[in-house]
């Protein structure tokens, strides 16, 4: 987008630039959990608690630090018959977020989870992320400013002007880390392989320069 002086403003050019930076993700976040059925609340909760504890221990056995283990939800609800009238039992659940800092361990970790929780295991999501996206965002901002400056210099040359100082700069929008990855599973959980791909961050900036 370009602009120029109005009846009372200084001559200027204003453009929008965009920049993207990419990097391979360095952590994998696994959202796992257990769902356990029982005839009464106490039994369901006890079973879910024991199996969730086994999941956490399996993660520790694979080198996951306590700081990278977080319980994200727990609860219990009744199960009804087909008519939805009579309570026939209870289901307890507990979910866990696990940050894996060595992506190569994901397959063996999921297999260990299956051994620890059995058929009660749930895997809600396996996501690839950057532990720290700040450096990537800084690169995207630099690229966005360079893109804006390139456009402004072109418009200035077309208009027979020269760029002066920056009058105004604003961060228009920022794209979060957008992962591009693939997961392939065949046979056992240990055969699960994770192709890291890349995470990308996009920054957009609006800059106004004086014309001299």
Image (spheres, rainbow, N blue to C red):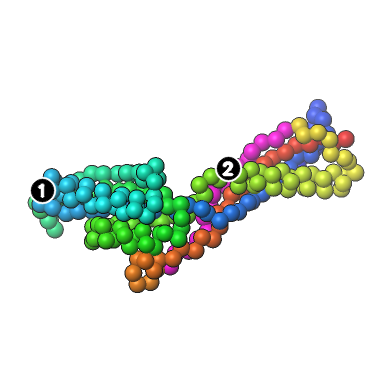
Compare residues 133 and 91 and report the one nearer the observer: 133
Between discs 2 and 1, the one toward the N terminus: 1
Report the side of 68 relative to 139 (left or right): left
In the rendered structure, which segment of residues is drawn in magenta?
168-184
The label on residue 54 is: none
Q: Which residue of the protein is positioned furthest toward the bottom in this rendering?
A: 187
At 74% from the left and 46% from the top, the residue drawn is 146
Q: Residue at x 82, y 48 (%)?
A: 154
Give me the residue at 66% from left, 49% from top. Answer: 19
- Disc 2 versus disc 1: distance between alpha carbons? 48 Å
- Quadrant for the N terminus in the image: top right
Between 160 and 97, which is closer to the camera in this rendering?
97
> In the image, 76: left or right of 88?
right
- In percent of width and height, residue 56 lies at 31, 49
Q: On the image, numbered disc 2 is attached to which residue?
A: 134
Q: Check whether the beta carbons of the residues at disc 2 and disc 1 lie within 8 A of each other.
A: no
User: Which percent across, then down, holds residue 129?
Assistant: 49, 51
**Is residue 19 covered in magenta?**
no
Answer left or right for 22 relative to 196. Answer: right
């Amino acid at each position: 987008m370009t602009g120029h002086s109005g009846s009372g403003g200084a001559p200027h050019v204003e453009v929008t630039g965009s920049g993207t930076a990419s990097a391979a993700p360095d952590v994998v976040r696994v959202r796992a959990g257990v769902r356990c059925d029982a005839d009464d609340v106490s039994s369901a909760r006890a079973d879910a608690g024991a199996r969730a504890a086994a999941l956490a221990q399996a993660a520790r056995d694979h080198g996951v630090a306590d700081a990278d283990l977080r319980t994200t939800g727990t609860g219990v609800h009744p199960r009804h018959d087909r008519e939805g009238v009579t309570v026939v039992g209870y289901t307890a659940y507990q979910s866990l977020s696990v940050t894996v800092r060595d992506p190569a361990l994901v397959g063996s970790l999921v297999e260990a989870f299956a051994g620890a929780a059995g058929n009660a295991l749930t895997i809600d999501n396996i996501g690839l992320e950057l532990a720290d996206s700040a450096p990537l965002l800084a690169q995207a901002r630099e690229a966005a400013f360079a893109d804006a400056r390139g456009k402004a210099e072109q418009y200035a040359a077309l208009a027979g002007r020269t760029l002066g100082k920056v009058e105004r700069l604003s961060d228009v929008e920022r794209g979060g880390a957008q992962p591009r990855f693939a997961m392939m599973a065949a046979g056992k959980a240990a055969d699960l392989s994770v192709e890291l791909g890349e995470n990308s961050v996009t920054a957009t900036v609006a800059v106004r320069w004086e014309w001299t």
